[in-house]
Image: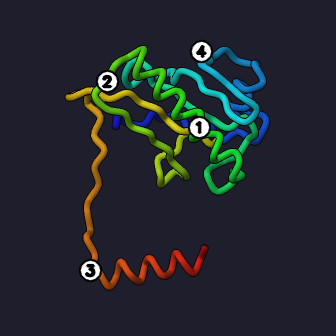
Amino acid sequence: MAPMPNFIDTSPPGHCIFCRLVAREIPAAIVCEDELTIAFMDIGQVNPGHVLVATKRHADNLYAMTDEEAAAVMITARRVALAAQKAFPSAGLTLLQANGAEGGQTVNHFHMHVVPRHADDGIALSWPRKEPAPTVLADYAQRLKDAL
């Protein structure tokens, strides 16, 4: 992925850049919106058609969202992806959502990137594979099942 900008918005709820956008206090190229979500052009376009889908209600991250908001974001992201494929035909698509500074989140308001992808577009999504043993994976799965 392109390098993350140096901008990190740490504004309180109601004052963050995306809350201000939802309130129409700042301009944005809005693509669509519904009761729970808003989709708008990312000002840092990675490829033509790069859209952010955000919750209208301020939620810092995935952990602060409701199930209804999470479902609405995915529905809006899919709608935007289908439109982007028509408007900006591409060979692929990346949905990216980051939580916390360590996860690469730069605006503390839940949002998902919808990015049309092309060969050699400069975006690299790779990480070191650890490939734990099957018994370790089974342990991880059980821990998650117990947490559910």
Residue situated in front as seen by the camera: 147 or 15: 147
**Residue at the image point whose x is 47% and y is 47% from the top:** 104
Mark 3 or 4 closer to N-term? 4
**Residue at the image point whose x is 31% and y is 23% from the top:** 90
Q: How far apart are marks 1 and 2 (CA)?
A: 20 Å
Mark 1 or 4 closer to N-term? 4
Q: Are marks 4 and 2 in contact (CB under 8 Å)?
A: no
Instruction: Say few, some or many: other residues with alpha carbon within 10 Å of mark 4 (under 14 / 14 to 19 / 20 or more).
Output: few
Q: Is residue 119 left or right of residue 99?
A: left
Task: Give the secondary structure at mark 1.
Answer: helix
Q: Identify the amino acid type marked 3.
A: Ala
Q: Residue 90 carries which label?
A: 2
Task: Give the secondary structure at mark 2.
Answer: loop
Q: Are marks 3 and 4 in contact (CB under 8 Å)?
A: no
Q: Identify the amino acid type marked 4.
A: Ala
Q: Are marks 3 and 2 in contact (CB under 8 Å)?
A: no
Q: Identify the amino acid type marked 1.
A: Ile
| Residue 63 image offset from top left, x and y in percent | 64, 57
| Residue 131 image offset from top left, x and y in percent | 25, 70
